[in-house]
Image: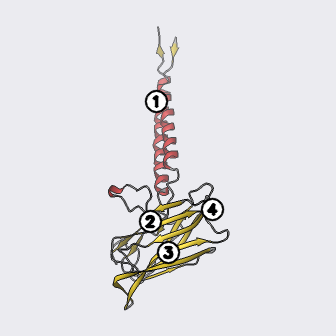
Amino acid sequence: MIRFRRTAGAAAALAFTAAATAVLGFAGPASAHVTVNPKEAAQGGYARVAFRVPNESDSASTTKLEVTLPDNAPVGSVSTMPVPGWTVATEKRKVDPPIEVHGSQLTEAISKITWTATGDAAVKPGQFQEFPVSMGPLPKVDSMVFKVLQTYSDGEISRWIDPPATGGEEPEHPAPVLALTAAGAPGSAATPSAAVVASPDDDDDDDGNGLAVGLGVAGLVAGLAGLALGGLAFSRTRREPVVKS
């Protein structure tokens, strides 16, 4: 009895399955959390940043956002852009030493910004909202870590307050981070007194979707290459019958 080898065909099918798994696995949505966009600005300058808030709940809406500015990096000028359907309130704190802004010495600085939805303006499931803020002069520190509380209509609160972890691993509840570069340094996002405008396409998520798609495509290409090689091997083995006595 004569039987053809099917090992190569099975290997090809396995390679294709692995490629599909890679695409589906890597291209899935990244963990949605509050981010700040753009992710980088220049020390000493002014920047327009936007806190991007995705709604993670399947049934509740986001009704409040509380952003706390870092204590170690006070900013003299902080202003908000009106968001339709949302009210905004700010809190101040004393700062020592004072902050110099355009020759004036400020002894108080904005410490917290709270947005609250009115009417039907809450961020519904499957949606996101951006809350723009202009701030400056930006302090001479490496980064600003903003602690954020996101309140849902069912009373649940997501606490995005974890600072960046050592080793590059993302913490469970990451806080939005704005990296600050020295003014005039290569790759700095702004120069003093220049505004940085956040584009809707900036992401940080941020934020991981572009990387996920790239990895998925790479996995698909590798899988298709394996499928082609497997098919070639299978076609060759079809011409080499195995004889069983």
Asked if one can make out residue 46 in the rendered structure from this viewpoint, the answer is no
Report if the CB atoms under discs 4 and 2 are less than 8 Å apart: no
The CA distance from mark 4 to mark 3 is 21 Å
Residue 167 screen position, x and y as percent? 32, 55
Tell which circle, 4 or 3, labels the residue nearer the N-terminal end: 3
The CA distance from mark 4 to mark 2 is 21 Å
Query: Mark 1 or 4, which is nearer the eye?
Result: 4
What element does badge 1 sit on?
A: helix
Which residue is label 4 attached to?
A: 124
The CA distance from mark 2 to mark 1 is 51 Å
What element does badge 3 sit on?
A: strand
**Residue 233 or 14: which is nearer the viewer?**
14
**Residue 10 or 109: which is nearer the viewer?**
109
Amino acid carrying label 3: it is Ile
Report if the CB atoms under discs 4 and 3 are less than 8 Å apart: no
Residue 139 screen position, x and y as percent? 36, 78
Residue 183 lies, with reference to residue 177, above or below; the image says below
Report if the CB atoms under discs 1 and 4 are less than 8 Å apart: no
What element does badge 4 sit on?
A: loop
The CA distance from mark 1 to mark 4 is 53 Å
119 relative position to 9: left or right = right
Residue 64 lies, with reference to residue 137, above or below; the image says above
Query: Mark 4 or 3, which is nearer the eye?
Result: 3
Residue 232 screen position, x and y as percent? 48, 32
Mark 2 crowd level (few <14, some 14–19, many ≥20, 10 Å Cα): many
Report if the CB atoms under discs 1 and 3 are less than 8 Å apart: no
What element does badge 2 sit on?
A: loop
Which circle marks residue 233 in the picture? 1
98 relative position to 236: left or right = left
Tell which circle, 1 or 3, labels the residue nearer the N-terminal end: 3
Residue 106 screen position, x and y as percent? 39, 87
